[in-house]
Amino acid sequence: FGSSRLRSSAPPWVPLGAGGQPGANTAMAAPQFAHTDDSVSTARHSRGDEAEPDYQDQIGQIQQIFARFNHDGTDKVRVENVPELIEALGRDVRLGQEVARQLSAGGLVELVSFEEVVQRLKKVEESAPPPEPESETTTPLTLLKRLQAYRKKCEMCGDYVEAQKARRKYEELRAKEEERQRRLVDQAQQHEMSEVEQAQKSQFLGFSAAWDKYMADYESTAYMSLERLKEQHASEFASFQEKLHSQPTRPKFSRELLELRKKQEALAKLGKYEDAWKVKEAADHLEDWEMARNQSSLNDSARRAEDRLRQQQQKALAALLKRIQRDRGEQIRHRQTDSQRLIQRNKNLKVDLRKKQHLEFQRAEAAIKSIMSQPEHAQKLLDENDPTYVARSAAMGELPALGRVRWRGPNLPENYQPPGGISKGLIRTPRDRLQASQGITQ
């Protein structure tokens, strides 16, 4: 709960100053008890029709104070009355004495205007050293306690109008402080949730980038594998063709052609050249036909061998493409599965965080109500214990007790033994002790 310096001796229901806005980096789910400057203001945060009357009341009070110290209607004040004026405005009397000393100029000035007093007061306050840590501070808890005490005092004095104002300010301050603490908790939880969402977004972007890189590498590797296989197939086909063309071909002639050649030679030896010429022409025609037939057969055989090689290569290429497609599909399915798992995991994490924050908010609200309902007791606890411990105890539904007073009355001696001989959790009677001394066992 925030705090502000005690600057006024006016009644506790008079607002003391504007409050600072809570920070967005609050990490606790319990209410904050650290001091923050000027957070107990009630007037400047008032809304609606109640703000204007309170402001006009304050202006009227200041005008009455100035009118009381106005010297003979000159709108000036005597220097010796400056400390009383400063004290009436809610400042320390020592501050007023310092202002009077500076305005007197060694006793040469007797009257000063109110504007000069205000300007000199501002300079003195700005040049004053910062207050010591031991100086009294005002927190919402102490202010609530003072409002309660002031209300009771007004009731005892019969000033019920002032008591009504004190009670109204007490309820207003309590409601505003509870709302501020709830807003602090809500802001802390929203900040925590936004950090979790940002971390999950960064994680998913990293996940997608890693998978994109992996798939790009996979596609590049698959493309290189296809290119290497195509180059290998082209090299094998060229080598196969070269082998076919360089292979020597020995034509195998028919028996009829061989017999004609023998007959041709025999007729030539016998001198029958005309018959030998006729046989030779018939043998040449037959040889040309058989050579053409053999060449056609060789070409058909080479073409079939090339077709078989191409089919084998096409099968190998199709198998590689099928394997690449299958692996690509598996990788895509793995990516989808991992992505769904990550998304579901993040959803579960956010659901658990919302449940945790809901429970923390309920505990924090219980702690706020418990502390604000007992301001005097809670302030003493904050003075004696760690604020976090007090907040956690209040969140459990019960404020811890104040420092326990140790009993200082008559006590039993330290060597006292209860009747019956209680020892190590066993109750032994005199008969048991007698049997134990005599070594008798049951």
Image: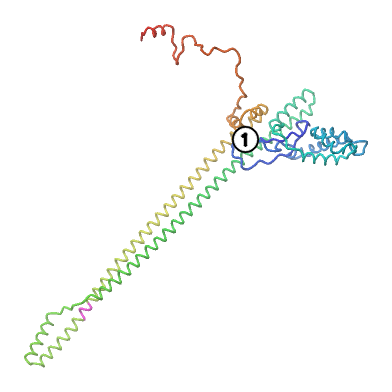
Residue lying at the far left in this picture: please name it. Answer: 270
For the point 55% across and 48% down, which residue is it? 198
Counting from the top left corner in percent of width and height, residue 118 is at 83, 40
Of 347 and 116, the residue lying toward us = 116
Give the x, y percent position of residue 126.
Answer: 77, 41
Image coordinates of residue 111 in percent, x first then y, are: 90, 38
| Residue 64 or residue 78, whichever sits in front | 78
- The answer to whether 439 is drawn above or below residue 344 in the figure is above
Disc 1 residue type (three-letter) = Pro
Say which of 306 and 80 sits in front. Answer: 80
Q: Secondary structure of the magenta portion, mostly?
A: helix
Check disc 1 and report the residue beneath it. Answer: 31
Magenta stretch? 292-296
Task: Indicate the quadrant containing the C terminus: top left, top right, bottom left or bottom right.
Answer: top left
Left/right placement of residue 74 relative to residue 283 reads: right
Instruction: Judge from the rendering whether residue 298 lies leftward or rightward of residue 390; answer left or right.
Output: left
Give me the residue at 93% from left, 36% from top: 72
Mark 1 lies on a secondary structure that is loop
User: Quick check: 163 left or right of 392?
Assistant: right
Is the N terminus in the top left, top right, bottom left or bottom right quadrant? top right
Taking depth in this image into account, of 135 and 215 the one nearest to the observer is: 135
| 210 relative to 49, above or below | below
Residue 37 lies in quadrant: top right
Residue 135 makes an appearance in the image: yes
Residue 117 within the magenta-colored segment of the rendering: no
Q: Residues within 10 Å of mark 1 (few under 14, many from 20)?
A: many
Q: How many marks?
A: 1
